[in-house]
Image (cartoon, grey):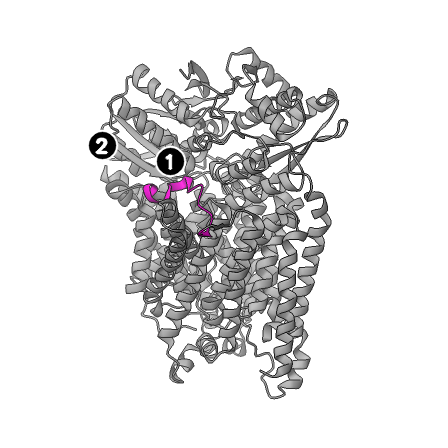
Amino acid sequence: MLIQLGFSGLAMGAIYGLVALGFTLIWNAVGIVNFAQGELVMLAAFVSVASLSQALHLPWAVNLVLTVVFMAVFGLFMARGIYHPLRNAPQLGAIVATLGLSIFLKNSAVLVWGPDPLIDSGPFGNATVSLGPAKIYGQHVLILVTMVVLMVLQVAMFRGTAIGKAMRATAQDREVARLMGINTDRVIALIFAYACMLAGVAGVLVAPVFYVSADMGGMVALKAFASSIVGGFGHVPGAVIGGLILGLMDAFGSYFLSSQYIDVISFGLLIAFLIFRPQGLFGEPEMERP
Amino acid sequence: MGTKRVRFVAIALAILSVAAMLIPNVLGVYYLHVVNVALVNVILAVGLNFILGFGGQISLAQAAFFGLGAYGYSILALRGVPLPVAAVAGVLLAGGAGLALGWPALKLKGHYLALATLGFGIIMQQLMINLGGLTGGANGLSAIPRFGLGPLTLDSEPHIFYLELIFAALVVALSVLFDRSPLGMRARALRDDETAAEVSGVNIRNIKVMLFVISATCGGLAGVLYSTMLGYISPDVFAWSTTFNYLVMVVIGGLGSTGGVVTMAFLLTLIPEWLRFLKDSYMAVFGLVVIVMMAAAPGGLAGLARAATAHRTRQRFPLSRKGAGKFELGKPREGKVG
Amino acid sequence: MKWLRPSALALFSLIAALALAACSGTAATGTGAQGGGAQKSGEPINIGVSAPLTGQFAEDGGYMKNGINLAVKDINDKGGINGRPIQLFWEDDQGPNPTAASNAVTKLITQNNVVAVIGPHFSPAMLPTEPIFQKYSVPALTGATGPPITAQNNPWIFRIRLNDEVGARLLVKYAVETLGLKKIGLDYVNTAFGQGGIEVVKDELSKRGITPVDIETHQDDTKDFTPQILNFQQKGVDGIIVWTDDQPGGLLAKQMATLGAKFKLVGSTTFSQPPFLKLAGDAANGAISISDFIPDNPDQHVQDWMKKFSAVYNTQPELYASAYYDAANILAEAIKKASKVDGPSIQKALQGIQNFQGVMTQYSWSSNGDMVHSGLITEVKNGKPVVVQVVKEK
């Protein structure tokens, strides 16, 4: 019983973590909180299921690749259209703009693909793996594994590769980076593209678990933000661990305490963290942030 | 204030009063109803402008204060508490919540504050939905008594219009006076550069809390007026997503500009009604317009207006910094190491 | 006074002028006629519809449109009502949105001068607008099922679907008497619909001396029901009664199947409707529901309706289209019988409707405004809902 509960909690947590990876990247690179990250996942899910799977009947692997490519292109547009004009404006402008983007995406999805929720069986269908008395969806395992892989990739990229170093330099001081010869505009465009690709992977993986609908992004994104706070805003492994913690808390809280007040409890925890330990579990205590 | 200004203000007030008396007779019931909704939104938006525009603190809790005022008034009114007492109680409840939220929020900045206030909003809405015995749950509260003093009850749209107009005017006047006052200047100092302000002797903590309380109190006032206008409230009205509308009103109106915020509040209430022909695509267009406005005009309507008169401003203040303005969003921020 | 600065003042005046211009232009037609005013013959009859055309429930709004448009087209093709065509005015109330609904209804009544309104559909939209209907003497027909809607002592409100107050009790009766459930768990979506329904379920159970062993709640966007299902299993329920919407219902059924839950799934109308069946797939089998409409209802009227609708729309009708098709026809019948074409006369005619045969069921007015007094108990077999019992209010 507890194993089952634990695993379903981890699965939901992995989804939060996957979404959190995306906007943590954007935050680290350009200091914008992307309130539209959930809708990006929704967009990818719709593209994947509605257009590629149901309309064109493409095999899953091709579907995944095409969706990710689509999202990458979308990310480039996002960098040019949203980030670029707001690059010197502080947080409030970006918050409002990304909230506007989320509303635009949510309602456009209904216009393009209709209001009906879509189902997709994914590569595993309803197959489950048995761990003792507990049954675990194959798809959940895939999500967990993918999340870990992507997290490791993200950390490695920032530390090890040239492009990663260029990203860090741009993030630290854009003017100086430019003076040092880094093409900051291109770097930032790449960052947005990659963050959208992450959302794309999340969308394809999550579609069989949930159902694809225009409002699927909302609560997941909120929980993903909360995960980041818990883990330490901007800390990549922290976002993922925060997600897992939040997922486990949702599952165990609903079971042992109350399914009625679970949201109150989750967000209460969020506020508690913000008041008493805003740097989360792994972040550094913040100095003055502009 | 010179005599020229006094005359100007007097004439403007006279014109506005006449207009106010004419409006209920000129507009049909439907449009008057929409105007009444707009007035409630004006109070909410101008209220939010205190903490957001003047103070530069990102609060996403305005809908929660709206709800506290509404539920405070409605619950008491339905239990037979004299209506003026219920109304004051509702407003104080919201203001008190602002105080309670303001203190812990002192150490939070930027997106941390945004998420904390957002969390508060979600918790409030969940409580409204779940404490059924008190709040009527998701079905809400019906047949809320219309506000009245003794034999004088408000039972028509024109009466409600006058009541709301008075309060809206009061809130707007407060905002304008605050803006011009030394207190307003200190608030703007806080918004533009908190460290510098603190070093210059501005009492940051007090101002932040005060701004929070003012915003919350305005939210509560709007809640009481809304309850009396519609006679029905439910948790749907106070979802945190409606906070976004007020955020847009303030940011696109122009942070710290009372006129801009009032204009946006009206526009944002009226435009959906005008654009009903867009039907399915209205919300998508709304989102798009918000993005475009933020990208093209971060200073909002007020910023645009100011730019239009920049030449005249430069003539009057030849030494001012080019591009510096009262309506901007505050200091730019930098990214963080990955 | 910076806000009185010429630029801001000019801008504000311009807006105000535009607004007043727009409003005044149409105000002339708004005043005078008290919504529901009598209209001359030969002229179109104005009927208003308040529906969720945008937002989360746009899907349902679309179905409503199908049903109502079909009914009105048929009527107008036959020459209208007493020689006068029906003209529909559609307004978007965005679903359970009190402010939007009150705006929509006010506009329909005071700007479009409708003699009757179909909708709004949701409780948080009906409850604030009921006083408006009463104030302007305009009857409203709604398919919302929340008990408070016909408990307001408002003679202008007519409900054209089974009141949850009745439906929930009939469902509990079936669960306890026919299925023999003894240890019962409850689960509901935390909205007006879910809360209202489950209150009635709880009350009926307590009348029968049964206390639920576990009560769980969820939101419309809850995705993981594992904790709830495990709780039910741990407390050893033999069945759960669920009051919820399509998506959570589908996920619940699917996850119950995966976790090997053995208890019966009994619930509200959604468990017999196409969205749930599609989303839950095989896991839908065995689900019991209290319903108004399923395609496989052998009743001849339903079968005829299926053919007719499919011929026009190339798809099967579902609950919303059917209910609101009937609503339009009931209204047309009342207008035909009314002494005058105005709100009060139509209201009287509606109160006189007895045993009106619609495509879903028969409609008879009762003193609180409810017009439906029977329902179907359905069970999903082989992926399709089948009528197991026809139940009637006593």
Q: Chain of mark 1?
A: C
> Quick one: label 2 or label 1, which is nearer the N terminus?
1
Q: Does any portion of residue A130 appear in the rendered image?
A: yes
Q: Nearer the viewer, residue B46 or B256?
A: B46
User: Closer to us: mark 2 or mark 1?
Assistant: 1
Residue A263 left/right relative to A85 = left
Residue A178 left/right relative to C39 = left
Question: Do tags 2 and 1 sit on the same chain?
Answer: yes
Given the image, on which type of amino acid does mark 2 rest? Gln
Given the image, on which type of amino acid does mark 1 rest? Gln
Q: Is residue C155 above or below residue A151?
A: above
- Estimate how packed mark 1 is, as few (under 14), some (14 to 19) or many (20 or more) residues with alpha carbons within 10 Å: many
- In the image, which disc is placed on residue B145? none
- Estimate how packed mark 2 is, as few (under 14), some (14 to 19) or many (20 or more) residues with alpha carbons within 10 Å: few
**Would residue B148 be counted in the magenta stretch?**
yes
Q: Which residue is mark 2?
A: C234
Q: Residue furthest bottom?
A: B319
Name the spot of residue A180 as percent of width and height, x first.
52, 78
User: Which residue is depicted at the point 47% across and 63% down?
Assistant: B48
Residue B148 left/right relative to A14 = right
Residue B52 left/right relative to B253 = left
The quadrant holding residue A81 is: bottom right
Q: Chain of mark 2?
A: C
- In the image, which disc is placed on residue C195? 1
**Would residue B69 be counted in the magenta stretch?**
no
Q: Is residue A85 above or below residue A194?
A: below
Name the spot of residue A88 as percent of width and height, x first.
54, 71
Real-space CA distance between mark 2 and mark 1, rounded to the nearest whole angstrom: 24 Å
User: Which residue is depicted at the point 69% across and 56% down?
Assistant: C20
Q: Which residues are magenta?
A: B131-150
The quadrant holding residue B59 is: bottom left
